[in-house]
Image: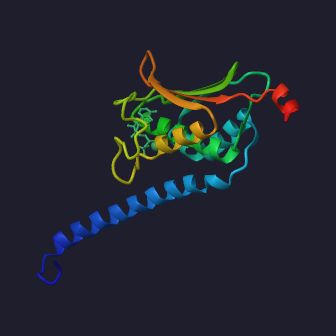
Amino acid sequence: LLRRNRPEEAMTAFHRIDDLIERMGAITRQLKSYARKGQSQLSPVDMGEALASSLSMMEPQLKARRVRIAKILPDEPVRVMGDRMRIEQVLVNLLRNAIDATKSEAHPEIEIILASGETAVLSVRDNGHGIEDLDALFEPFYTTKQPGDGTGLGLAISSGIVADLGGRLTARNGSDGGAVFEMQLPILNETHQAAE
Ligand SMILES: Nc1ncnc2c1ncn2[C@@H]1O[C@H](COP(=O)(O)OP(=O)(O)O)[C@@H](O)[C@H]1O
Ligand SMILES: [Mg+2]
């Protein structure tokens, strides 16, 4: 295009190539972080602590968008058998998505509830635009974001991680708008530990 003296078109093509390279980078970064999982050792993980570190990792983005965070945690620690890095990876993904979904809210809010019963349940609720397509949500490469903003791998990888740990990741739209994601994991109770 340059040789034919069409610099405008060459520029457009370069931008397109640049965007695609950026996107390839984002996809390989996500896949690499999942591929490492094979070596991981399962150990007791305190869900409250995993949540606290995920929130602090996301603090710059949460602050920049002035997102209000409401946390409801039980008095007793909630422990699961897992891989702390992976659990935090799921939480960071959910928080990142909640921040994105509340982008045009004047008062963005994320509510996080940790509860334990037969399973450990951590739910992340936001007051954003809600989920468009519940059936496609966990499909790899399903994204409603601009190329460069989303790879569509976050939830596919996250649900894989939760399933590997014997739990499940589910999603629904809240009754008054916004999305609710729920991560359920088998609880680690003291009797379990004593038996091991
Ligand atoms: N909290 C949420 N509220 C509304 N839609 C969501 C939320 N989280 C995820 N989604 C939808 O699911 C899609 C896939 O999410 P994800 O797998 O994390 O990929 P990505 O964030 O790269 O798009 C998003 O593009 C969005 O359309
Ligand atoms: Mg995402």
Q: Quadrant of ligand 1?
A: top left
- Between 142 and 6, which is closer to the camera in this rendering? 142
**Label tally:** 0
Is 123 situated left or right of 102 in this image?
right
Give percent across and percent down for residue 24.
40, 61
What residue do we see at 12% from left, 80% from top? 5
The quarter holding residue 83 reads top right
Give percent across and percent down for residue 11.
23, 70
Is 16 situated left or right of 2 in this image?
right
What residue do we see at 49% from left, 35% from top? 98
What residue do we see at 37% from left, 65% from top? 21
Residue at the top extreme, as displayed? 175
Vertical comparison of 165 with 23: above or below: above
Give percent across and percent down for residue 42.
73, 44
The quarter holding residue 16 reads bottom left
Residue at the right extreme, as displayed? 194
Residue at the left extreme, as displayed? 4
Q: In which quadrant of the rendered image does the C terminus lie?
A: top right
Residue at the front extreme, as displayed? 195
What's the image's color scheme?
Answer: rainbow
Q: In which quadrant of the rendered image does the N terminus lie?
A: bottom left
Is 57 situated left or right of 193 in this image?
left
What residue do we see at 51% from left, 41% from top? 96
